[in-house]
Image (cartoon, coloured by chain):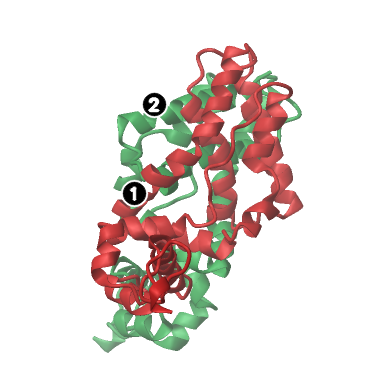
Chain colours: A red, B green
Amino acid sequence: MTADAGTPARRGPGRPRDEDLDAQIIEATLGLIDAEDEVTVSRVVARSGVSRAALYRRWPSLTTLIAAALDVGRAVPPDIPTHGDLRESVFAAMFGDPASLSASGYSEVRFRQRIRLVMADRALQKAYWTSHVARRRVPMEKALRAGIARGILRADLDVDACFDAFAGAAYYQAVVRGDRFDDPVTRDRLRAAFDVVWRGMAT
Amino acid sequence: MTADAGTPARRGPGRPRDEDLDAQIIEATLGLIDAEDEVTVSRVVARSGVSRAALYRRWPSLTTLIAAALDVGRAVPPDIPTHGDLRESVFAAMFGDPASLSASGYSEVRFRQRIRLVMADRALQKAYWTSHVARRRVPMEKALRAGIARGILRADLDVDACFDAFAGAAYYQAVVRGDRFDDPVTRDRLRAAFDVVWRGMAT
């Protein structure tokens, strides 16, 4: 038995792979977040069974760890097809199937927790913005630039600001109105907002 | 001395006017919110010196009391001039002077606390939406309808959705990017978003 320990194919319980440790730490952090417990290094260590040293080697600060945990289930979306009906491709990428978000493990409960945590801590908010949200915006920004190159969208567009108007309308539903994305009334409202913004972007 | 108690002109300390009690209760509630203490009826009673019965007579639930406290300093804005340059009047009403917001006592700290509280409690979010945010939207919605009547804005507009796109872009700055409204970069971005949305609304 011990002869196998440490080989790539099989390991003893004392020699987990790095990815296993990552997963254990993230899982422990999410457990604390979901339980609305304050996340501290000591609690993550106790809950994950991973050493403090191993934790700090992976995440130099608690802020980056919480930001990473909050991002579980939220991959950078794939490139948006820029040939064909760009308007519908952008709409689908922006407001498409709300079920796919929950299927990815990014529940509404966790969304609401994420907003609470970032509103309590601007350093966390900025870390989450830089390392996660900003990266997820890239495919959309590329698609909008492709639309400009194709002559569909105005050459003078501030692509960042257009994204903020689309995404902001969606955040407004969840953060201000308290409405759910799978509510048909909400979806109609977002479709109407999208149509107005797109018309303002088009040549 | 006692002869004066209860008369409109002068009162003893035991007979404060109703508005005084309201103010004491709201002030105690805001004190707890600003200190990030959980708001409970017992704590508001202890801090304000107002009786539990008097508190419940004014606010039948803690939710409505917290919603009212969060709204301090945020009046329903005045009507927007609908003759003249409607576009600039709407812009000014929507994104005008950020200093006026802080001057009204509605600080960024309180804004961030408000978002945290409503994200923790959907009943509070809905109460705050119905009794406060929705009411503050009315002057803007009237102005946009006047724009439709004047033929400046498209007749088929979903006025609610347009408001959500404007306001959503602003919330996105504060809630997702973590940027401040008095930052010139933020203001330029909001101006660009406004211009796109308005162009999509115009005939």
User: Mark 2 = which residue?
Assistant: B188
Q: Position of residue B201 (x, y in %)?
A: 64, 25
Quadrant into which the C terminus of chain A falls: top right
User: Mark 1 = which residue?
Assistant: A127
Q: Residue at x 42, y 69 (%)?
A: A24
Q: Residues within 10 Å of mark 1 (few under 14, many from 20)?
A: some
Q: Residue at x 58, y 62 (%)?
A: A107
Q: Badge 1 sits on which subunit?
A: A
Q: Residue at x 54, y 78 (%)?
A: B60
User: Marks 1 and 2: same chain?
Assistant: no
Q: Nearer the viewer, residue A84 or B28?
A: A84
Q: Look at the picture and state if B33 lies above or below A119.
A: below
Q: Is residue B160 visible?
A: no
Alpha carbon of mark 1 to alpha carbon of mark 2: how far?
23 Å
Q: Position of residue B184 (x, y in %)?
A: 31, 29
Q: Look at the picture and state if B160 lies above or below B14.
A: above
Q: Position of residue B199 (x, y in %)?
A: 60, 21
Amino acid, disc 1: Ala
